[in-house]
Image: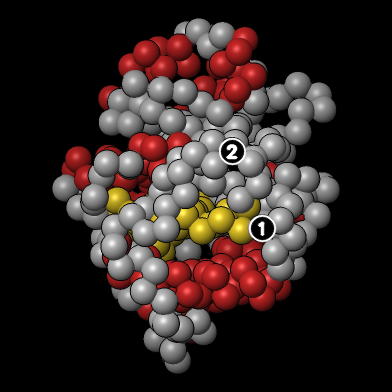
Amino acid sequence: MKCSYHPSYQAPLPPGHPFPMSKYPLLKERLLAEGIIAANDILQPEPIDVPTLELVHTRGYLAKLASSGLSAAEQRRLGLPWSEALWQRSRLASAGTLLAARTALEDGLAGNLAGGTHHAFADHGEGFCVLNDVAIAVRKLQAEGAIERAAVIDLDVHQGNGTAAIFDDDDAVFTFSMHGERNYPLAKMRSNLDVPLEDGVGDAEYLDALQRHLPAVLDAADADMVFYLAGVDVAAGDRYGKLALTEEGIRQRDRCVIETVRGRGAPLSIVLAGGYAATRTRTAELHAHVFREAVAHELRAGVGPPPCSRTESPAADTHRPAATAARSSGTERP
Ligand SMILES: [Zn+2]
């Protein structure tokens, strides 16, 4: 399995900053050490060019990012202090998601050992997210004619508000977000399908909801490319998560998405999104599961039916079913 990675995915942050930047190299080293990926499976992206970023982001916002022009308030909303290295890593991580998507079009499955920065809007960043890498990859591939339709399966514990807003009036991109209802962001945007979960939801309820909705999401999306935001902040004990999935529950979730999407023959591009476990090593360990499951899927591809093939729910039979707009119950940071 090919995965995008760059050493500069890790940008320096002030001491004590809660964002676990070191999870990126820790994850890469773990996957290599386990033989999940080989050295020649790693694809190193080049920083993405500004015209490609302009397919999603406003010129005004990009000009601020390129010139240290974010105000103190804008940096607080972002949750990260601006630096040249942060701007560089954001462009590299977005390039990594685009590279993974291109690779998935050829190989069927690929990943980025970063990405999933779904709180980035067209004109601003928030919640540790500078650029919306998945939106950029979708728009670039559409512009090139490589894809027409895309689906975004966002299982990070926080709603994919930036992604939902960017694709709000775009019928070619289906956005699906399953997230903590009482968690960040305070004001939810409207995805094509939002599935809000109560605090404390564990494996059984979570997996049941996923299995009920995912087939209908994929039916409605009819996507040429599927992006999976495999955030691990759904794990029990996550600093910001409020849900209670076990490690085995996360593996089952990831297996379900991979088997269901690939079982339909759609190319799948996997990105990390969030994870805030007690240690950075633990966070990287949790992120590794989706890649373990992806490689295991490749090994058994074509053998047996998907493990989660329930299809009783027609939940996504209209384009904007059960959307939950502008909820105001969130409290925490992403
Ligand atoms: Zn998150």
Counting from the top left corner in percent of width and height, residue 97 is at 43, 45
In the image: residue 34, left or right of residue 53: right
Q: Is mark 1 within 8 Å of ligand 1?
A: no
Residue density around tag 2, few if under 14, some if 14–19, many if 20 or more, within 10 Å: some
Tell me which numbered mark, 1 or 2, is placed earlier along the sequence.
1
Secondary element type, mark 2: loop
Q: Tell me, yes or no, if residue 120 can be seen here.
A: yes
Q: Tell me, yes or no, if residue 255 can be seen here.
A: no
Counting from the top left corner in percent of width and height, residue 327 is at 54, 42
Disc 1 to disc 2, C-alpha distance: 14 Å
In the image: residue 13, left or right of residue 129: right
Q: Amino acid at mark 2?
A: Ser
Q: Quick check: 264 above or below 285? A: below
Q: Nearer the viewer, residue 303 or 171?
A: 171
Q: Quick check: 12 above or below 296? A: above
> Which color mode does the image show?
secondary structure
Total marks shown come to 2
- The residue sitting at 61% across, 58% down in the picture is 197
Q: Quick check: 297 above or below 75? A: below
Counting from the top left corner in percent of width and height, residue 2 is at 46, 58
Per the rendering, the mark at residue 198 is: 1
Secondary element type, mark 1: loop
The answer to which image quadrant residue 230 occupies is bottom right
User: Which residue lies under the disc numbered 2?
Assistant: 328
- The residue sitting at 66% across, 58% down in the picture is 198
Residue density around tag 1, few if under 14, some if 14–19, many if 20 or more, within 10 Å: few
- The residue sitting at 29% across, 62% down in the picture is 318
- The residue sitting at 46% across, 44% down in the picture is 325
Per the rendering, the mark at residue 247 is: none
Counting from the top left corner in percent of width and height, residue 63 is at 40, 12
